[in-house]
Every structure is written in structure tokens, then in C-alpha cells.
Image (cartoon, grey):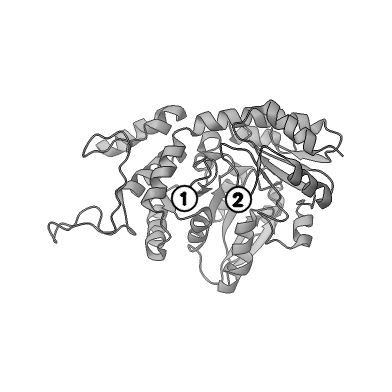
Amino acid sequence: MTDQNKKQTSDRQRSFATRLLHFGGEIDGATGASSVPIYQASTFHHRDINDPPPFDYSRSGNPTRDALEQYIAVLEGGAGGFAFASGMAAISTAFMLFSSGDHVIVTEDVYGGTYRFLTTILNRMNIATTFVDMTDLDRVKAALQPNTKAVFLETPSNPTLKITDIEAVATWAKSHGLLTLLDNTFMTPYHQRPIELGVDIVLHSATKFLGGHSDVLAGLAVAGSESLGRRLKQLQNGMGTVLSVQESWLLMRGMKTLEARMAHSEESARKLAAWLTEHPNIVKVYYPGLEDHPGRAIHEKQSSGYGAVVSFDVGSGEKAKQVLGKVQIPLVAVSLGAVESILSYPAMMSHAAMPREVRLERGIGDGLLRFSVGLEHIGDLIDDLSQALQD
């Protein structure tokens, strides 16, 4: 084992809180600066044409972005990390691993942007998708076709927070020579590390909890093996879907406080979910931490916490719009995972690209709202929502 590999192994044995601050590339090697410098350069001088430098052109590699990519690889326990211009850039680039004629099995209530990409872009490339309820492993197995190449998981799913048994699906997929890809945006590596459960590629909309401040647009991918990492690197470089150095630096700054933010927001989310279950104007509450959540036992087996997103149904689109118009504290906006709470309306926001009949089949009703709990005092959030829910 090389000294570098030994150091990486040592880094990954530290507690998560320590790795957030000491991931191995946090100090500038040239100056000792405590913050990774922003290398605002498009190209790099070759002092010896026969001995090229480690970086030559920023699409292919940049020291600032490289530090971020090392960072997420350490946190997820992967062989290599890759930073992209958005979460969808990361997801779409990963899907370029597949070719015309291939077939992919996908979580049925997947994020609307992923659904749109699969059904309006990837289908034109003759890459087919079967959407299944992955809470039932038998349904996943039944979707297998001779040309199936991969399984794409999202757990908890967006926005109904269904839970998929990651290890069970990954083990089955591996037995059939299939790749597994998992969107880990909701849980982040603080709560859930899919590579340790057998997943091949982990994806993030880093715009959300990893960035955490509603000020950066970014996507990340982590490969579980070096060979798969080389394939992702080739796609990232060839497609040019890279993250800028400014965004890379902002994302690293946000990630340093991930544990503190997630722990606070989850504590408030638990209280909010419990309060909502007792409210007379709420039809249903979706949160993995509730005693009656159907996937709670599986979630607890594979995740260390329940997350900071709570979805709830107020019964109708009209009532949902009334609540959206009355709340004072949360942003009414697309996105989630920020220091400020964000209340979203999936039917017209994250899942607007999904036909209404498809949404309803997947439990995403017109009255469904998604609450991403931020760092405000939980008492103020409950008071605000209580007033908004009044008839």
C-alpha cells in the first residue's frame, strides 16, 4: 500500500465530524493556507513538454475542483469523486455509461428532473426505462430484461419518502452483472453511505444539503471502484459538464458544517412530523422517523438518521395553495436542504414534468407539500404552519 493510500485509509477511519474538516486536501500544499485556494485559471503552463504537469486545462482538471472531488470521495468511502455543474449534470453524465438498446430499472417516484431526463431525452437515444416500486424487491426482479444494464435507486424517494432496501437491491443487481446508481441527496453521507452497502455510483444534487446555503448549484458523483471512476472521468471530461472553481470553493465551505446543520434540522424535522400527525387538517404525513412509516425498519438498518425532509398531504390542491400563500417563515420555492426552511409544491415544482395521472399513480397528489426543515426555531416553524393550516 502506498503512503497516499495509507493516508486515505487513515482519513476514512476518522469520525465523520473530523473528516468533514480534515479530508486530506484541506490545506494548500504550496502555502499552507487553511482554505483551498480558488485557482481561477483555464489553462496551465507546461515547463517541460515531455513531462506534463498534473493539470493542463481546467475542463480536464483544476486544483480547486480536485480538492472537492477528493473531499466527497472520502466522505462517501469511494474510489473517486467527480464534480458537475448541477445535480442533473451529474445524473445525466452517469447515464451516459449506457448505450442505445440498453434498459434501466428506476425507482417509480423518482425526482421529477430525473424522470424528465429519462422520458424525454434518454428515450430518444433508445435507452429504455422501467419504473417500479422498489419497496418490493420482487417487483424489481420482475422488471429484469435481457438488455437491462443498471438499477437506479432513490431512497428515501422524492417526495413520498419511500424506502428501498439498498443492500438487497445491490446484492441482487450484482448477481446479474448490473450497475447500481443511487441518488443520496436527501440523506447525504452523514446519514447514509450506499457504497458501503454495495452500490456502484452515488449521486448528489450538492445544491441541497451539502452546499446548504441556497447559494451554489452543483452535482457530485462518487464511484465505488477505480475502473468505474476512470469511465466517469472520461465522460466528465468529454462532455464538459464540470463544476466551476468558484462553485467548488463555495461547496467545500458549505460542506464543513454539514453535520451541525443536518443534526439540528433533523431534530426539528422529527418534532414537525410528530406535530403534523396530530393536526386535524392533515390527511397524511410522510417521514421515515414516524413509528408507522412502512419503511422505517429498513431505513434504520441502512441510515443513521431520518433526515430533514417532511412531506404531508393537506387533501387538495386548493388547500395546498392556501397554505403556500399564508406561510411567513419558509421560502416557497424549488429546492431543499438549506439553512432556511423551504416549502415546496411538488405538483407544480419538482414534479411538474410528470403527467398528473402518473403523479397520482405514484402517490404524489395535488394536496402534497414537501417541507425541508432549516435552522429556524421549531416553535416558530410550528406556529407559522399552524396559522397557515387554519380553515
Q: Residue at x 47, y 32 (%)?
A: 257
Q: Residue at x 79, y 34 (%)?
A: 387
- Residue 252 sits in which quadrant? top left
Q: Residue at x 41, y 59 (%)?
A: 236
Amino acid type of the residue tagged 1 in the rendering: Ala
Which quarter of the rendered picture does the N terminus lie within?
A: top left
Label 2 residue SS: strand
Q: At which x and y percent is residue 277?
A: 80, 33
Which quarter of the rendered picture does the C terminus lie within?
A: top right
Residue 232 shows up from this direction:
yes
C-alpha distance separating marks 1 and 2:
14 Å
Label 1 residue SS: strand
Q: Residue at x 46, y 40 (%)?
A: 76
| 361 vs 369, nearest the viewer | 369
Residue 81 shows up from this direction:
no
In this figure, which residue is indicated by the disc labeled 2? 153
Amino acid type of the residue tagged 2 in the rendering: Leu
- Residue 251 sits in which quadrant? top left
Query: Of marks 1 and 2, which one's residue comes earlier in the chain?
Result: 2
- Mark 2 neighbour class, 10 Å CA radius: few under 14, some 14 to 19, many 20 or more: many
Decide if residue 336 is on the left or right side of residue 321: left
In this figure, which residue is indicated by the disc labeled 1? 221
Could you say which disc has been placed on residue 87 in the image?
Answer: none
